[in-house]
Amino acid sequence: MKSYVLTAFGSPLQTVEAPMPVPQGTEVLLKTLASGVCHSDLHIWDGYFDLGGGKQQLVANSGIVPPITMGHEIAGEVAGIGPEAKGVKPGERYVAYPWIGCGECPNCRAGRENICTAGERTLGIRRPGGYADYVLVPHPRYLAPLGKLSPAQAAPYACSGLTSYAALKRVGEAVFRTQPILILGAGGLGLTCLKLLKALGGKGAVVSDIDPKKREAALAAGALAAIDPKTEKPARALNAAAKAPIAAAIDFVGAESTARIGMAAIARGGKYVIVGLFGGEITLALPLISLRALAIEGVVTGTLAEFKELMALVSQGKIEGVPLDERPLAEANQALMDLRAGRIVGRAVLKP
C-alpha cells in the first residue's frame, strides 16, 4: 500500500510503499476513502508547539517521533477484520474515532480516552493514520457508520466536528440556548461550531476572523455577525453586534490576540474555552478572574461517547455540512501548505 509519511520534522511528506496490514485480534482494516487535513497536523509536521516568549514544546518530548503517517479524520470501508472483531463486515463504511487511549489509566477507565495519561494509541499521531491507502483500527467500538454521508463529508466529524461539539458541551446547553456566544476563528472548526449551534437550538454566535472570505463563510453559516478583530476595540464591537451579554467564547485559534479578545469580550460569570493551538502566551490579572467570576477551560477533542452522540445527530440529518476542499491524497503536502497559508475555507479532505 502507499502512504505519505513524515520522515523528519519540518520536511515534506515522503511516499512510502509497504505491504498491506493484516488485522489481528479485534483489529479492523479500513480502506481509506477520505482523510481530513487538520491544523494539528501542521504542529506535528513542524515538530513543536509555540509556548510564547521563544519557548517551544517539542512533539518528540511526548514520544511522537517520525516516521509518522498523519491523518486522524478517517472515513473508510472495511477491507478485513481480525478473528476477534465482531459486529462489522467487509464492505461496510465507517468513520473512525482516532483518540484511542491505553484503556487502563484513570481517564481511560472514566471514558476519557482523548486525554489518556499513560501512552495513547491515537490514529494519525502515534499509530499510522489516514494519509495512506489503508488504516488499522484497534477495535470495532471505535467505528461509527457513515449513514447517508459521503466519506468526504463524514471524515471531518472525527476531529473538527467532535472538537466543536465537545467545546459546545463545555459551554453548556443551558447557556448557549439562552445567550449568544463568541466564536474566535471561522476555519473548519468555527464553521462546524456554527452549524452545530444551529442544530442544537443555540441562541446564536458572533464571529471574529481576520480573513474577509472566512467572515463571509461565517455569515453564510448563520453567524449573527462577523467582525474583523483588527477593528478598533474589537471586544466592544463584538458585544454590540451580539446585542446581549456574551456568555462564553470558544477560541478555535488559540493565539495571543484571540485570547485577549475572548477574555475581554465575555460577560461577568462567563467562560473562555480554548481549543486552538496557534501558540503564544498572555498575562492575566488574577484578581479580575475572581472578580469577574470567569472560567477558563481547555478542550482537546472529545470522548468516544461524545463521538457516538455526534454521529447519531449527523445520521439524522440534523447538522448541515461545511464547505469542503477535496483533493487527491497525492496532494497532501500542498494541502498542508495551503492550510498553513489560510487558503482553505472550510475543511480540506484528501481522497486516495
Image (cartoon, grey):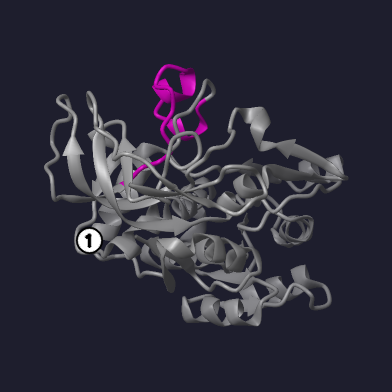
Magenta: main secondary structure equals loop
Q: Position of residue 337 (x, y in %)?
A: 61, 64
Q: Residue at x 62, y 77 (%)?
A: 226
Instruction: Say which amino acid is labelled 1.
Output: Gln
Examine the rendering and report whether any part of residue 243 can be seen: no
Q: Residue at x 58, y 55 (%)?
A: 39
| Pick the front one: 22 or 159 | 22
Secondary element under disc 1, as helix, strand or loop, is loop
| Pick the front one: 249 or 128 | 128
| Pick the front one: 349 or 131 | 131
Examine the rendering and report whether any part of residue 303 can be seen: yes
The answer to whether residue 342 is left or right of residue 135 is right
Q: Quadrant of residue 325?
A: bottom left
Q: Position of residue 182 (x, y in %)?
A: 61, 64
* Residue wearing tag 1: 316
Q: Residue at x 84, y 40 (%)?
A: 286
Q: Position of residue 169 (x, y in %)?
A: 47, 48
Q: What range is drawn magenta here?
A: 96-116
The answer to whether residue 187 is left or right of residue 330 is right
**Position of the C terminus by quadrant:** bottom left
300 inside magenta stretch: no
Q: Position of residue 14 (x, y in %)?
A: 52, 51
